Image (cartoon, rainbow, N blue to C red):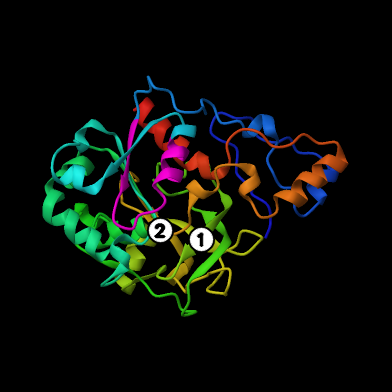
Amino acid sequence: MSYIKNSSHPGSSPPEASKPTASSQHPASRVQNPESSQHPGSSIQDPASDVKALVLTGYGLNCDHETAYAFELAGARAERVHINSLIDGSQNLADFQIMAFVGGFSWGDDHGAGVIQAVRMRTNIGDTLLKFVNDGNLVIGICNGFQAIVNLGLLPGLDGDYQSRTVALTTNNCGRFRDDWVHLKANPESPCVFTRGLRQMDLPIRHGEGKLFAEPAVLERLIQGGQVVLQYALPDGTPADGAFPFNPNGSVHDIAGICDPTGHILGLMPHPEAYNHWTNHPEWPQEKETRKRQGLPLPSGPTVGIQVFQNAVDFVRNR
């Protein structure tokens, strides 16, 4: 597992061309210079923030605390809201600009991962969700949340259709649950708001039904439209070409995440919220010791996982 590599955020200075340094020669020492990796405006939650993120909770969902924390680190006001509170009207989706469908095992994954959650939400607040999307707000679905929004039809959103299911997330080819870290390649041509400025990254996965499948015609449209946002990759950043365990589930075209044509809706199987601090990375002990021996500073600023959320907050704040 190579250490995290995140490209310069728009507005940061590009690295100068120079001969390799001791840090660049070490295979694990690939953390961007702390000064240039400091994302503008990153902070813990600001009570006065004008960006509000709704993080779904309830019925087997178990990543809501981490996801809310990630949004708070990105400067948003994050609120954990039970699905029933949206259904009974005690919480209004219109009060938020970002909505997060989080990871977990909603309804125990009975009848398929994310299926019952999608049916319950479509039946009770389907029109509300469509209005939220059509108003230009942001939606992220992570792992089980990705499965739910695919079943809802919010992705891939071809031809402005946010109700039809045209892709599926199904059982891993290996036939078992995978709990690991993966290398990812981000598509710089994608319209996705969440991945702006990102090129390569490592993120954790934990799923049993993460294989994305689509008919050839649909897959081609996703590729041509830049809607394939993230692909599973080899350590050098090239697509995994289906090789296990780099592609952990057999997903077609090594797809780890897709967006809608506007780039406002992202679904991905890896967990960016679970890489919220440098010490989360499995190679952190080696990286820390390497930097210590070379007299280099430890990384600061947000991880690439938090940058996913920071991009969303910045987009809402600046639109």
Q: Residue at x 40, y 41 (%)?
A: 193
Query: In screen coordinates, is 284 left or right of 259?
Result: right
Q: Nearer the viewer, residue 16 or 151?
A: 151
Residue 183 seen: yes
Quadrant of residue 61 in the image? bottom left
Q: Amino acid at mark 1?
A: Ile
Q: Residue at x 31, y 60 (%)?
A: 106
State the extent of the magenta-drawn residues as a range. Answer: 52-71
Mark 1, Cα crowd under 10 Å, few <14 / some 14-19 / many 20+, is many
Q: Secondary structure at mark 2?
A: loop
Q: Is residue 308 above or below residue 35?
A: below
Q: Secondary structure at mark 1?
A: strand
Tags 2 and 1 touching, CB below 8 Å: yes
Q: Which residue is mark 1?
A: 205
Direction front: furthest residue:
59
Q: Which residue is mark 2?
A: 143
Q: Amino acid at mark 2?
A: Cys
Q: Is residue 137 above or below residue 280?
A: above
Mark 2, Cα crowd under 10 Å, few <14 / some 14-19 / many 20+, is many
Could you tell me how far apart the alpha carbons at marks 2 and 1 are, in whole angstroms? 8 Å
Q: Residue at x 37, y 19 (%)?
A: 48
Image coordinates of residue 22 in percent, x first then y, are: 85, 44
Direction top: furthest residue:
48
| Residue 288 is a magenta residue | no
Image coordinates of residue 211 in percent, x first then y, are: 41, 70
Query: In screen coordinates, is 195 left or right of 258?
Result: right
Image coordinates of residue 195 in percent, x first then y, are: 46, 45
| Numbered disc total | 2
Name the quarter where the N terminus is drawn.
bottom right
